[in-house]
Image (cartoon, rainbow, N blue to C red):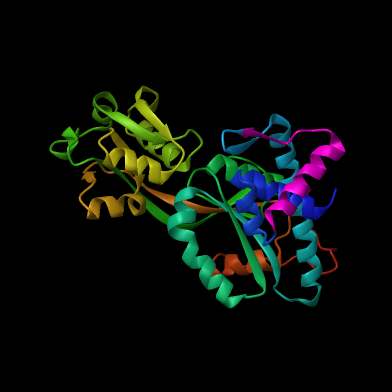
Amino acid sequence: MTFDQLRIFVAVAERQHVTRAAEALHMTQSAASAAVAALEAHYGVRLFERVGRGIELTEAGQIFLEEARAVLARADAAELALTELGGLVRGTLSIMASQTIASYWLPRHLVDFRRAHPGVALRLAVGNTAQVAAAVKEGTVELGFVEGAVEDPLVRSEDVASDQLVVVVGPDHPWAGAAPATAAGLVAEGEWVLREPGSGTRSVFEEALREAGADPLALRVVLELPSNEAVRAAVEAGMGATATSASVAAPGIEAGLLHHVPFALPQRAFRLLRHVERRGSRAALALREQLALPRLRPRPADGSGRG
């Protein structure tokens, strides 16, 4: 088994498409297919199965994907450690962020970072708050960015920005004319389109209802969707109400496809996550400093430091 085979497998698994994976890795489709086939043949395990015109991971493939990501993350970390022996900021920085942050807040900061540190390649994966926290804890990424609270003694969080949640409905929804004035009214009278459990947006909204004296478990959730854009599109089409980031809702409100319900929701923090027991690479420390976070000591080049 080689690192190249692992990278090809992960690329195919994440895209569920051999040709797209090959294009992303700048190789031929036949070479990508051969690498996956060689893994399956050598170990006698089917990693993918065809479903219609596409492919999906088998149960064995899903288990192997977690292990492959972890191995590649440690290999990247080892490579980064060597490149930093000379005090240079270069290598690869692996990041995972929640959808709202990855789509609306983080890109401009990554662009600024890349301009300042052209020797560092950035890898960004997207998941919900629970998935990001797990990736940081397991070491598959060095830094995470989320908007939900994370309660794990091995994951440290630092506030880096804030975001406003808003309640929105379609222009023909009854609440576009007169909305409930209380949290209890929102829960009792509305049908809701929300992100999946584990999403930071949903967690913050449910906590706000709880603090306002309403029971979020009583919400009539008629549709759960895995992305902010899908939630927004469903509500624009007239399917219930939602709570989402003002950044996500802004295009729909400006186009007249969404109506802002005047119900006050709290601001939420965008948080940077890192593992409490792992020393940050120079690249990670440089990104933290760019975000104006307190300076940390870099990992010693000889690996002798503790902290």
In reply to whether residue 110 is colored magenta, the answer given is no
Q: Residue at x 86, y 39 (%)?
A: 42
Spot occupied by residue 25 in the image (x, y as percentages of width and height): 67, 59
Q: Residue furthest left?
A: 177
Magenta range is 28-50
Name which quarter of the figure residue 153 lies in: top right
Query: Measured along the vertical axis of the image, is residue 210 above or below residue 155?
Result: above
The total of numbered circles placed on residues is: 0
Q: Which residue is depicted at the point 74% across and 54% down?
A: 31
Say which quarter of the image contains residue 295: bottom right
**Residue 228 appears left or right of 185:** right
Q: Is residue 269 left or right of residue 218?
A: right
Give the left or right position of residue 302, taking residue 52 as reference. Answer: right
Is 23 or 288 nearer to us in this picture?
Answer: 23
Q: Please provide percent x and percent y for residue 94.
A: 65, 57
Task: Give the image location of residue 86, x and y in percent.
Answer: 80, 77
In-front residue for pair 196/200: 196
* Residue at image point 34% right, 43% down: 232
Q: Is residue 201 above or below residue 19?
A: above
In the picture shown, does residue 217 fall above or below 121?
above
Quadrant of the rendered image containing residue 191 = top left
Residue 89 appearing in the image: yes
Residue 127 appears left or right of 221: right
Q: Is residue 43 magenta?
A: yes
Secondary structure character of the magenta stretch overall: helix
Residue 138 rendering spot, x and y as whole percentages: 70, 44
| Quadrant including the C terminus | bottom right
Q: Is residue 307 visible to the viewer in this orientation of the structure?
A: no
